[in-house]
Image: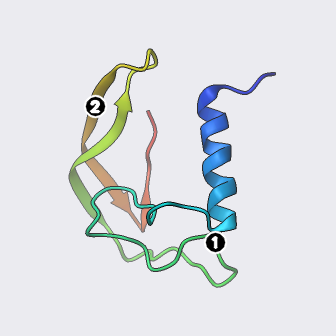
């Protein structure tokens, strides 16, 4: 079983995250919401189960498998008990 380019990119991202090697603060979404901690989950990390929201729009992917730019947004994504299911 080989490693795809996407898996290789994820491995590079995780390796650099563990080492604290980044050019800019990593964020998922808007720059207004940057994390105050970056790294693996701590032993004391717990899911905030009181969060229940519907996100009207969420960026799902930016590129097609061919590499062409084609953003795809998912509508009405649910955060239930602090968990977002981000399945295809």
Residue, x 25% and y 69% (percent of image)? 32
Between residues 22 and 13, which one lies in front from this camera angle?
Answer: 22
Q: Residues within 10 Å of mark 2 (few under 14, many from 20)?
A: few
Position of 22 with respect to 61 (left or right) is: right
Between residues 2 and 24, which one lies in front from this camera angle?
Answer: 24
Q: Position of residue 6 (x, y in %)?
A: 59, 32
Camera-near label (1 vs 2) is 2
Q: CA distance from mark 1 to mark 2?
A: 29 Å
Find residue 88 and name its label.
Answer: none
Report which quarter residue 42 is drawn in. Answer: bottom right
Q: Secondary structure at mark 1?
A: loop
- Classify 45 as above or below 12: below
Coloring scheme of the render? Answer: rainbow
Residue furthest front in the image: 23
Q: Position of residue 54 (x, y in %)?
A: 24, 57
Marks 1 & 2, CB-CB < 8 Å contact: no
Residue, x 35% and y 59% (percent of image)? 79
- Classify 14 as above or below 32: above
Find residue 71 and name its label.
Answer: 2
Residue holding disc 1: 41
């Amino acid at each position: 079983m080989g490693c795809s380019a996407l898996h290789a990119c994820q491995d590079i991202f995780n390796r650099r995250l563990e080492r604290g090697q980044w050019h800019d603060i990593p964020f998922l979404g808007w720059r207004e919401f940057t994390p105050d901690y970056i790294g693996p989950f701590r032993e004391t990390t717990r899911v905030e189960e009181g969060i229940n929201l519907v996100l009207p729009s969420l960026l799902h992917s930016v590129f097609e498998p061919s590499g062409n730019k084609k953003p795809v947004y998912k509508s009405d994504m649910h955060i239930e008990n602090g968990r977002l299911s981000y399945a295809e």
